[in-house]
Amino acid sequence: MKHGRLIFYAVLGVIAAVTLYSCYLSPKAQVKRAVYGARDAVEAQDMAAIEALIADDFRDPFGFTKEQWLPVIRVSFGEWKDIKLRFLDLQIEIKNGRATAKFTVNGEATRAESLGGDKAPDREAYTFRDITLQLDQRGGEWKVTSWTNINSQTWQVPMPEVNP
């Protein structure tokens, strides 16, 4: 009896360790948490969390930096409320400490200027396909260093001019 119980607990311990690693500690699980953390920060319109998630050396394919994107995001948050996002088909690939997360976003938000008054709020739905985030591990955390298919039209506010 004691031998069977010992084997049972050993197998249970191995299963728990593998589950803990794959669901919480693995690099892929960490990247997934960072990506969903970005979603949660946008939904909460939490500028501090967004600023912390974006790497200081961030640069998108058009050359825009973190410092140029943060005001765009801030203005967009003034124009849109009650943002809800769903990430579909999330695919994560990690090579040499760099992660690529690809997904589709289904979302909806309410135009801020339509709130209040006697009219129904202007709620808009949207789908953005082929979103890609590049993330690098920095100080034990995954930071967004670039993205594709996210532009100022996505946020419906103009981009500031790029200073070469």
Image (tube, rainbow, N blue to C red):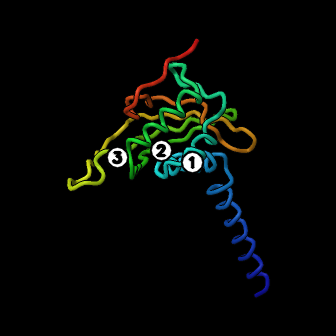
Quadrant of image for the C terminus: top right
* Drawn side of residue 161 relative to residue 18, left or right: left
Amino acid, disc 2: Leu
Q: For marks 1 and 3, give the one nearer the viewer.
A: 3
In space, the residues marked 3 and 2 are separated at their CA atoms by: 29 Å
Residue 136 rendering spot, x and y as whole percentages = 66, 35
Instruction: Label 2, secondary structure: give it.
Output: strand
* Drawn side of residue 8 relative to residue 110, left or right: right
Q: For marks 3 and 2, give the one nearer the viewer.
A: 3
Residue at mark 2: 90
In the depicted view, which residue is nearer to us: 148 or 159? 159
In space, the residues marked 1 and 3 are separated at their CA atoms by: 30 Å
Q: Residues within 10 Å of mark 1 (few under 14, many from 20)?
A: many
Amino acid, disc 1: Lys
Q: Residues within 10 Å of mark 2 (few under 14, many from 20)?
A: some
Residue at mark 1: 32
Q: Which residue extends farthest top? A: 164
Quadrant of image for the N terminus: bottom right
Q: Which residue extends farthest front? A: 117
Residue 19 rendering spot, x and y as whole percentages = 64, 61
Which mark is first along the chain, 2 or 3?
A: 2
* Drawn side of residue 110 relative to residue 130, left or right: left
Figure quadrant of residue 142: top right
Whether the residues at callouts 3 and 2 have beta carbons within 8 Å, the answer is no
Figure quadrant of residue 93: top right
